[in-house]
Image (cartoon, rainbow, N blue to C red):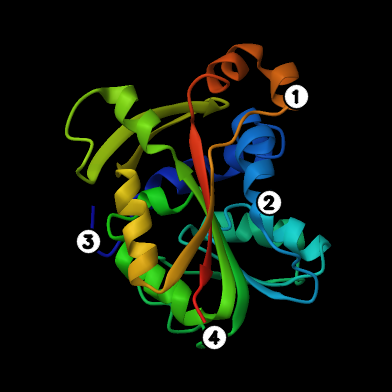
Amino acid sequence: MSEDKPLALDAYEALAESYAARVDTKPHNAYYERPATLALLPDVSGRRVLDAGCGPGVYTEWLLDHGAQVVAIDASPKMVELARQRVGSRAELRVADLGKPLGFLADESFDAAVSPLTLDYLEDWGGVMREFSRVLRGGGVLVFSCEHPFERFKRTQTGNYFEIELQHYLWRGFGSVRVNMPSYRRPLGAMIAPLADAGFVVEQIVEPLPTEDFHRSDPNDYAKLMRDPGFICIRARKDV
């Protein structure tokens, strides 16, 4: 893999269409992560919001439907095109790598940013948190979700919990497409420290529970998630 290529780009390019076809009803997304993440967002009506890691545009569409002005970015050109098919010209959409400076975004030009299930693909959170802080206005809110550090370590029982470690998993949940998905596991402290260093104050940490829609769709995974956390959702505010 080229050092300039985003970590999971090839995997997401391969599964983009299958992901987009299932994301509205796939239980772990639609009935678990998404309700918890959306519940952490402030009122977005009339606000300018950055969708950082927009995928096929599910969050972008929700934000637009709730009155936000949206700039949506993703490292995958296929995902950006799928988001464009979903929302048309209602949002500004562009290909961008969160692992690099977002120089095309002006300082203090957003009221909020949301980054769902994206930051696990970055080894270093220092740079991206500084960029989020730079583009948010004072008092602006950052909401993001990622895999729960306990679940990631429990799943493998190898390595060192306190280290940031590259891991690979075979993703099977998107129809016939199978991809070897790379991502980084990190301890909880390595999630919080970059926020503080970038001038954020953590307001809320949520370890979500699956909804009843999840129960109806997949009772086995519902029972598991009622015992063991799968994702973690965090809301932080840029200190004024």
In the picture, residue 59 is in which quadrant?
Answer: bottom right
Q: Residues within 10 Å of mark 1 (few under 14, many from 20)?
A: few
Which disc, if any, is residue 141?
Answer: none
Name the amino acid type tagged 1. Answer: Glu
Q: Which residue is mark 3?
A: 3
Image position of 146 with respect to 60: above or below = above
Q: 174 or 36, which is in the foreground?
A: 36
Q: Amino acid at mark 2?
A: Leu
Q: Please identify the quarter of the rendering in which residue 214 is found.
A: top right
As measured in the structure, the alpha-carbon distance from the residue carrying label 4 to the one carrying label 1 is 39 Å
Q: Earlier in the sequence, mark 1 or mark 3?
A: 3
Instruction: Mark 2: give few (<14), some (14-19) or many (20+) Cα within 10 Å.
Output: some
User: Are circles 3 and 2 on residues that touch, CB within 8 Å?
Assistant: no
Write down the residue under mark 4: 108
Q: Amino acid at mark 4?
A: Glu
- Disc 4 and disc 2: Cα gap in Å? 22 Å
